[in-house]
């Protein structure tokens, strides 16, 4: 059986932001010209974790990255390579040769700052030169900027950490989102008449600024307006365990065990400690009213 020809976009793709989408758009264009399949080749661990020993808080889990590449980038063919010390020490020529020969890449699309191989010696220019002598096409894309600011995962992480979800969405090209399977909580919201769905921040993923957000929850039947609290629930406890609690507006139903995606649309307020459950319930009611106004504004197109 013949191996399919691929046009492969290479990179880590954390956040699948506007720069990443430009790479994937070019890969799709070249694949159509060449009668090949557009593909993304990426890594399961951030290179800085292995190369520098630095834990990088990512914008999404690996599963979410795969889903985002398909949803925002229009590419279903995604390969995650295992990035460990042995992989780090691979000569860059061997890696690129493997992409071409073992993965069927007839054309590569890379960013201007992409590098690979031992000590990062496989720069974009060297990769393009190698491709030129081995019959493989190669496009190097320049840096993408928005409002005069370079689009980067690092910058977007800073926006998410600050709770600036509206600006983050402009640089991502889509709302910042988190997804996880709904787990059982303490039922406190239900006892207050404001039931919530609960899940943890996925391991290794950045924690947004603690506070209350206008969100949109994607359930099996489609999107639902919601209000979400990210934090440590100081009214009830004082530990540092971060949870995501979401009140779905005008929705009734059990969602335990269901995977839910939350799109973060706007920051409402910082997390606060209330003197009583009654005060907390009152504030949640005001948060819900604020979220409804936000959705009405969006619906009106103003």
Image (tube, rainbow, N blue to C red):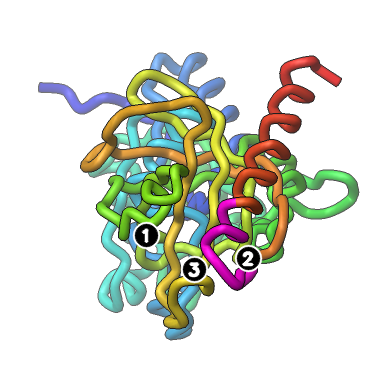
| In-front residue for pair 217/128 | 217
Residue 300 on the magenta span: no
Residue 208 at what x, y percent from top left?
58, 62
Residue nearest the observer in this picture, 71 or 201: 201
Mark 1 Cα within 10 Å, few/some/many (few <14, many 20+)? some
First along the sequence among labels 1 and 2: 1
Q: Which residues are magenta?
A: 271-281
Residue 198 appears left or right of 298 = left
Q: Is residue 126 above or below residue 3?
A: below
Does 210 sit left or right of 188 as displayed? Answer: right
Tag of residue 271: 2
The residue labelled by disc 1 is: 200
Q: Residue furthest right?
A: 148
Q: Which residue is mark 3?
A: 233
Q: Nearer the viewer, residue 123 or 262?
A: 262
Residue lying at 31% horizontally and 29% vertically, measured from the top left: 253
Residue 275 counted in the magenta span? yes
> Residue 239 at what x, y percent from top left?
42, 82
Residue furthest to the left in view is 1
Give the foreground label among 1 and 2: 2
CA gap between label 2 and label 3 equals: 8 Å
């Amino acid at each position: 059986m013949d191996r399919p020809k691929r046009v492969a976009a290479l990179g880590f793709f954390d956040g699948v932001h506007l720069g990443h989408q430009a790479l994937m758009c070019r890969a799709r264009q070249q694949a159509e010209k060449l009668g090949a399949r557009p593909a993304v080749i990426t890594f399961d661990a951030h290179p800085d974790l292995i190369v520098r020993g630095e834990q990088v808080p990512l914008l999404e889990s690996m599963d979410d990255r795969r889903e985002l590449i398909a949803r925002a980038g229009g590419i279903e063919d995604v390969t995650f390579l295992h990035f460990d010390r042995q992989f780090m020490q691979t000569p860059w020529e061997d890696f690129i040769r493997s992409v071409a020969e073992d993965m069927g890449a007839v054309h590569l699309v890379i960013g201007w700052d992409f590098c690979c191989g031992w000590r990062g010696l496989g720069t974009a220019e060297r990769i393009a030169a190698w491709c030129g002598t081995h019959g493989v096409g190669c496009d190097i894309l320049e840096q993408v900027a928005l409002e005069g600011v370079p689009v980067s995962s690092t910058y977007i992480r800073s926006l998410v950490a600050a709770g600036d979800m509206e600006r983050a969405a402009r640089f991502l090209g889509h709302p910042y989102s988190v997804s996880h399977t709904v787990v059982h909580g303490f039922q406190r919201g239900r006892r207050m008449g404001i039931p919530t769905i609960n899940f943890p921040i996925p391991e290794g993923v950045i924690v947004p600024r603690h506070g209350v957000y206008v969100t949109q929850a994607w359930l099996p039947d489609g999107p639902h307006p919601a209000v979400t609290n990210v934090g440590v629930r100081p009214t009830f406890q004082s530990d540092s365990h971060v949870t995501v609690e979401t009140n779905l507006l005008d929705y009734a139903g059990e969602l335990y065990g269901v995977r839910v995606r939350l799109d973060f649309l706007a920051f409402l307020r910082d997390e606060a400690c209330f003197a009583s459950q009654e005060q907390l319930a009152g504030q949640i009611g005001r948060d819900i009213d604020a979220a409804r106004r936000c959705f009405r504004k969006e619906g009106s197109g103003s």
